[in-house]
Image (tube, rainbow, N blue to C red):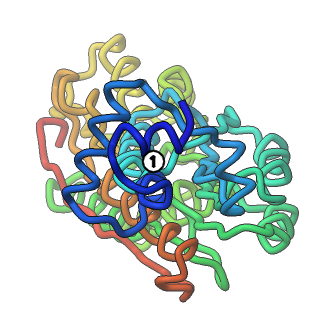
């Protein structure tokens, strides 16, 4: 089928069909007629032809650190909803937490294979900053804060600070900390800084983990082997916390009687693990929607201003404290 054939079947002009396919203005009556014909014929417009004609691929590149993350899946769901509503497609690039792979995808996307990029970042190196600056299409950074670029991120410092205060309110005076690398400004440095503002800690009460269950398990094992007096354990993510809880249970330590545990993220697992994990809820889905809306505003020349949006959090006080 061609646009001319669709127009003939619908009894409308070719320009009306073209406006429909490109999300332009058209009366509701004509829109419904064209939509019905397209559904009946199974017509799929040529993306190559559309790109040549409009200069736009109607495709947004989304770079993610990993696809098996609960938080990332919620962010991508928010992005996808907005893009679908606006007749854009999502091209997902999974980096498996490899900074080199992030740079490769930034290079692939920068020259117009997509109309814009949403970058869900972890570690921002000087090479990343250079790649972002040299990107030839609009870009929004999600999950990290960086000057001179549109960023949507979370209050990692505040969430960690308020969670740590819960330990103190529950008379926990020997706290341990399992975090991630401080090269990750958000999940690493900001969360640790918030924790330390509320509670002074020495290095021997700190362990570093990756973002996995096994990482949390092994970090808890190392930490408790040298500091058995710990009665409160702060974990930088829910996944790390749940891994740590598995080790604590194997040691016959009662949670929270012997040791209280908190995480960050309000993952699905945090709500079904026993006991249910005390954590901080982030608005991942909403942040994804915000990023997609802003990137479309830039593409469509609605709003070209650089934005810095920091989402808040909600404490979810459950059974581990």
Residue 168 at x, y percent in the picture: 23, 61
The answer to whether residue 229 of the structure is visible from this angle is no
Residue 9 at x, y percent in the picture: 37, 37
x 21%, y 60%: residue: 28
The answer to whether residue 171 of the structure is visible from this angle is yes
- For this orientation, the residue located farthest to the bottom is 305
Q: Which residue is mark 1?
A: 236
Residue 36, above or below 193? above
Helix, strand or loop at label 1? It is loop
x 43%, y 46%: residue: 7
x 86%, y 70%: residue: 130
x 85%, y 45%: residue: 104
Of 249 and 93, nearer the camera is 93
In which quadrant is the N terminus drawn?
A: top right
Q: Is residue 257 left or right of residue 74?
A: left
Residue 148 at x, y percent in the picture: 67, 85
């Amino acid at each position: 089928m061609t646009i001319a054939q669709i127009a003939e079947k619908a009894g409308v002009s070719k320009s009306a069909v073209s406006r429909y396919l490109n999300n332009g203005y058209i009366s509701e009556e004509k829109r419904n007629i064209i939509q019905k014909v397209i559904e009946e014929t199974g017509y799929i417009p040529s993306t190559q032809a559309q790109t040549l004609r409009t200069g736009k691929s109607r495709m947004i590149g989304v770079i993610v650190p990993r696809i098996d993350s609960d938080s990332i899946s919620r962010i991508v769901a928010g992005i996808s909803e907005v893009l679908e509503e606006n007749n854009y497609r999502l091209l997902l690039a999974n980096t498996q937490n490899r900074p080199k792979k992030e740079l490769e995808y930034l290079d692939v996307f920068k020259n117009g294979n997509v109309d814009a990029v949403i970058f869900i970042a972890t570690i921002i190196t000087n090479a990343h900053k250079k790649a972002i600056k040299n990107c030839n299409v609009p870009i929004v950074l999600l999950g990290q804060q960086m000057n001179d670029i549109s960023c949507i991120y979370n209050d990692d410092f505040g969430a960690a600070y308020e969670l740590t205060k819960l330990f103190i309110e529950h008379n926990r005076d020997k706290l341990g900390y399992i975090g991630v690398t401080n090269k990750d400004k958000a999940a690493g440095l900001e969360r640790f800084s918030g924790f330390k503002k509320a509670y002074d800690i020495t290095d021997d009460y700190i362990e570093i983990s990756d973002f996995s269950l096994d990482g949390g398990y092994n970090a808890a094992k190392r930490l408790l082997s040298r500091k058995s007096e710990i009665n409160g354990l702060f974990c930088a993510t829910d996944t790390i916390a749940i891994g740590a809880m598995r080790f604590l249970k194997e040691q016959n330590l009662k949670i929270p009687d012997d040791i209280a545990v908190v995480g960050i993220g309000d993952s699905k697992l945090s709500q079904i693990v026993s006991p249910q994990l005390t954590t901080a809820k982030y608005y991942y889905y909403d942040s994804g929607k915000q990023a997609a809306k802003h990137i479309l505003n830039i593409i469509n020349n609605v709003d070209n201003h650089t934005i810095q949006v920091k989402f808040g959090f909600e404490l979810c006080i459950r059974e581990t404290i």
